[in-house]
Amino acid sequence: MSISFLIIAVLIVGSTAAAMGLRNPIHCVLTLSITFGGIAALFLQLGAEFVGLTQIMVYVGAVAILAVFAIMMTQSRRGLMLGTFSRNALVGLLTAVAVFSVLGWAVLSQPVAGVTAAVSPVSVQQIGSSLMHEYVLPLELIGLLLTAALIGAIVIAMERKEDTE
Amino acid sequence: MTQTPDQVFVILKHWLLGYVPTSVHAIASAVLSILPLMVVFPLLFAITTLLERKGLGRIQNRLGPNRTGPMGLWQPLADGIKSLTKEDIVPFTADHIVHFLAPVLLVVAAFLAYAVLPVGRNMALVNLNAGVLFFFAVGSVVELAVFMAGWSSRSKYSMLGAMRAIAQMISYEVPLVLASVVVIMQAGSLSTVDIVERQATYTGIFPHWYVFTPWGFLGFILFMIAATAESNRSPFDLPEGESEIIAGYYIEYSGFKFALFFLGEYLGMFATSGIAITLFLGGWSAPLSVLTFIPSWAWFFLKLLTLICMFIWVRGTLPRLRMDQLMNFAWEFILPMALFNMVIAGLWRFMNPGAVRWFVCAFLILVPMFVLSALLKRKKKLQLRTYSFAE
Amino acid sequence: MTGLQAYLLLSSLLFAIGLAGALTRRNAILVLIGIELMLNAANINFIAFWHYGPATTYITGVMFAIFSISVAAAEAAVGLAIIVAAYRHSHTIDLDSMNSLKG
Amino acid sequence: MSRDRGSRLLGEGIIKGLAETARNFFGSYISKQRLTTVQYPEERIPQDESFRNFPFLVYDGSDPEAGLRCVSCQICEKECPPKCIFIEKSKDKKPDAVGKPQFYPTVFDIDVSVCMSCQICVEVCPFEAIKMDVKYDYPTESRFAALLFDKHQLAKSNDYYHQIHPTEASAVDAALAAEREAAATKAAAAAAKAAAAKPAATAGAPGTATASAATSTVTPPSDTTAGEPR
């Protein structure tokens, strides 16, 4: 429970709560990118350097901007009239609290014997070779999935003639 | 061989560290290596603004600024004072927090990129195992800062400029990364220090820089084109096209925040050209083995200055690209060429060294170049212009 | 409260906030963001278990996190595309009003 | 390029352009006359003769009061489109260049901030008294009072006029000289007539014969239009 972990944890929880609570969706996405940055800092702290950097690049660099663009494109003319929380918001909140209490109890009650051995950060060569050896199939599938997602996203979001009459 | 002139800064730092109590040792060594970077590159920014204005002047058959100081030497100082004393107007409807944070994030991201830049022999701030990936990760944060700037000033021009800037930066970041993947394949490591170490060896008097290989030369050109687009400069400065949308995303900024945007942009330019030097031009290694007596950091900054002059030269020459030309060029020429380049670099690696390998790869590069440039030219037939108005 | 439990607690809190966001927000994009958060919470668990796990030479945790990040990115792209298409069709992204299955 | 010489490599135009600017860049260091910069306050671009800015009053000789050509006929004041000229006529008269007693302006103000240098006042002035100056930098503190030029600021000598508009000045001088000469000959003729008429009256000779002879000589010469406004 080092101090740096505490600082980052407070930063993450604060920005996540803001991301889910703020009224203006753009503010939500900006605070969300602070959360992603905090999570990347966690990964770096845990020694998974490559994952931390990929997290920054993928989430802060791409997903945050994608979300912001989507918000820009769906800015309905009625503006922020629609309320921030849906009608049955309370039920959702209660379920979330219930989930958290169950998870928290599970984590705190079972003494998880975490080995605190000094872990050398995983090197890129290690990841590269394991990608090419044990995880070749997932790598190919991920390539396929990303291409399909790319084409699918474009086809769905493309302006077709019959929409714009 | 660590002759003293080459390692003068490293020795200086250790000598200074001697005076620091060991408890604060780690922080002191971090500060001691960060501080010179924070001083040197803004100074380089000041020099570049002067160099740029004089260079552009000379290209257009006129003198550059020569009023302030002998050769206009105090012009950056004058600009700095002017931007400091200018009133900082924030539009009333602007979103004040985000409006303030945008330039801060931009400059922070620009400075972060210098963590992995090997400025001289063992003078890289931190030897990250995934150095190049760190650079691109931080580079992608800049787009978020640009959006924050554009959106928070609540003005049509800045929003339009921000959208254009982000579209351009995203579509040129892909080829930027792919152009550097080629070097990583060849060097076998993502760490910038290793990449430069691998290029610093010589056969006879010629260095093993990657730019002297066919795929390296093509990669260098693609990287520089993408770097120009990444930093919104010269032919790709559409987001701040003065004629159409006045000043793009930093239109509602004035005073020091405006200067911060320029600082961020120029620091981004230096960082990308620094990485281009590290990847293709052999970082701090001397161009000829006989010239290694000149210290390594001097070579790095000499190469950086030549690249800056290249940027200025290109800025003085090429007209601004239209938005669709810009996008077509990215997705239909630069990206396929980068992918071809990766294939050819793979081929290069598994062919046995010699002249045959050189010509085969060079030929294999020229063919797609011709084909793609023909394709790109074919698209230029004039069609009826269709307008789609915002409903 | 060992290091691992702290990480797990943090990720479950993150997961709960993401779930709360996904369940309570009206704006479709923010629901998607809530889901992104839940995915990230899972990633934190992977890396925490790998770090505090017995054999850190087997980097399965790290590999799983990398694949999960790329899948989450693809999912975000497609999700936002669907939202944009839904907006173009019904000119609103208010989830409460998207309750009719008619085309 | 309009004609597409086959599928040329994409970069050729760029390389030619870069070569062009490089030639400019290094050329500017080699031959200095390529540079078009004029260091403004020190060096100035020589003005060509037809340049004009605000009007000024011309005076002959050395004394601006006496030699002022303007006879305050106020035509320019009436003709000036933005109405920026203000003249007050003097009560007494002073002899002008030709010697004929004329009025002169006690007050002659031009509001330079209103004047649009259209040169109409110059065209309508029958006495060539007002011409267009070439001086354009008038740094002043106040925006209104300092830009209202009075008679003394406006009056400039004829050789200054020769300096700024040489050809025009010499043409005007020639016209004035011709005019003066015509007036002089007319005066001489009138004097001769007066001298001839005096002996006729004194001799008391019968009126009609010499009178008719006299009248024939005294009919005013129809061609010279001395004095008529051009």
Image: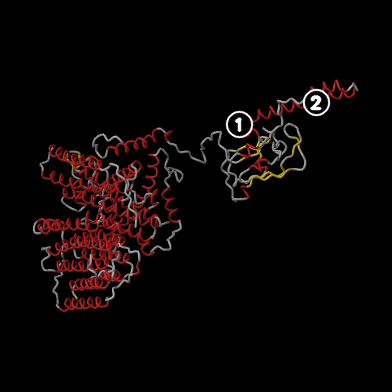
Looking at the image, is B371 positioned above or below residue B76? above
Kindly identify the residue that appears in the image at 11 percent across and 59 percent down: A138
Toward the viewer: D81 or B348? D81
Q: Inspect the image, locate mark 1, and give the three-letter code of the amino acid beneath it.
A: Glu
Q: Inspect the image, locate mark 2, and give the three-letter code of the amino acid beneath it.
A: Ala
The earlier-in-sequence mark between 2 and 1 is: 1
Residue B326: give x, y in percent of width and height.
29, 47
Mark 2, mark 1: which one is toward the viewer?
A: 2
Residue where numbered disc 2 is placed: D191
What SS does tag 2 mark?
helix
Residue C33: give x, y in percent of width and height.
25, 66
B336 left or right, relative to D54: left
Residue C4: give x, y in percent of width and height.
17, 71
Kindly identify the residue that appears in the image at 79 percent across and 22 percent down: D217
Kindly identify the residue that appears in the image at 61 percent across and 31 percent down: D168
Find the residue positioned furthest to the right. Answer: D204
What quarter of the picture does the C terminus of chain B occupy? bottom left
Looking at the image, is C14 positioned above or below residue B60? below
What SS does tag 1 mark?
helix
Toward the viewer: B57 or B331? B331
Quarter of the image for residue A50 reads bottom left
Residue B86: give x, y in percent of width and height.
45, 56
Q: How many labels does the image show?
A: 2
Given the image, what chain letter belongs to the residue carrying mark 2?
Answer: D
Residue where numbered disc 1 is placed: D168
Toward the viewer: B298 or A28? A28
Looking at the image, is A35 positioned above or below residue B198? below
- Tag 1: Cα neighbours inside 10 Å, few (<14), some, or many (≥20)? some
- Tag 2: Cα neighbours inside 10 Å, few (<14), some, or many (≥20)? few
Distance (Cα) linking label 2 and label 1: 34 Å
Residue D147 seen in this snapshot: yes
